[in-house]
Amino acid sequence: MAGDYDFDDDDAKETTKGGRLKEFDCPGCDANNPVHDGFGDGDELRCNYCGCEYKVKISAEGRTKFKEI
Ligand SMILES: [Zn+2]
């Protein structure tokens, strides 16, 4: 078709503001756990080291909190 528009859809939009986080430090054992799919407010995470599960809560200020399930 006419035109040669090249939509650049892999624009670097990696900002985490309101987005997904990629890792967390376990509140129980302090291990750093990468999360491949990312996580956000309300998600449940499991520590790969101690096996504890946590529910994520992100406050209005952007602080991440973990509540043991
Ligand atoms: Zn842990």
Image (cartoon, rainbow, N blue to C red):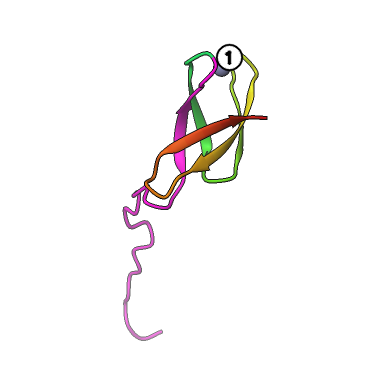
Q: Is residue 67 magenta?
A: no
Q: In the rendering, at what x and y percent does residue 25 appear?
A: 46, 23
In the displayed structure, would residue 4 be above or below residue 29? Answer: below
**Residue neighbourhood size for the residue with mark 1, other residues' Cα within 10 Å, grouped as few (<14), some (14–19), many (≥20):** few
Residue shown at the point (34%, 54%) measured from the top left: 13
Name the spot of residue 15 as percent of width and height, x first: 34, 49
The residue identified by callout 1 is: 49
Mark 1 residue type: Tyr
Q: Is residue 17 above or below residue 5?
A: above
Image label count: 1
Q: Is residue 5 located in the magenta-colored stretch of the structure?
A: yes
Most distant residue in the bottom direction: 2
Rendering quarter of residue 22: top left
- Residue at the (59%, 19%) spot, across then down: 48
Mark 1, ligand 1, within 8 Å: the answer is yes
Q: Relative to residue 51, is residue 12 depicted above or below?
A: below
Dominant secondary structure of the residues highlighted in magenta in the image: loop
- Magenta residue span: 1-28
Front residue of 11/67: it is 67
User: Dividing the image into 4 quarters, which one contains the N terminus?
Assistant: bottom left
Left or right of 36, for residue 54: right
Ligand 1 quadrant in view: top right
Local secondary structure at mark 1: loop
Q: Is residue 30 left or right of residue 8?
A: right
Is 24 positioned to the left or the right of 42 in the image? Answer: left
In the rendered view, would you say 58 is above or below 18? above
Between 48 and 8, the residue placed more toward the observer is 48
Instruction: Report if residue 39 is visible in the image.
Output: no
Looking at the image, the residue that sits furthest to the right is 69
Residue 59 location in percent, x, y? 45, 45
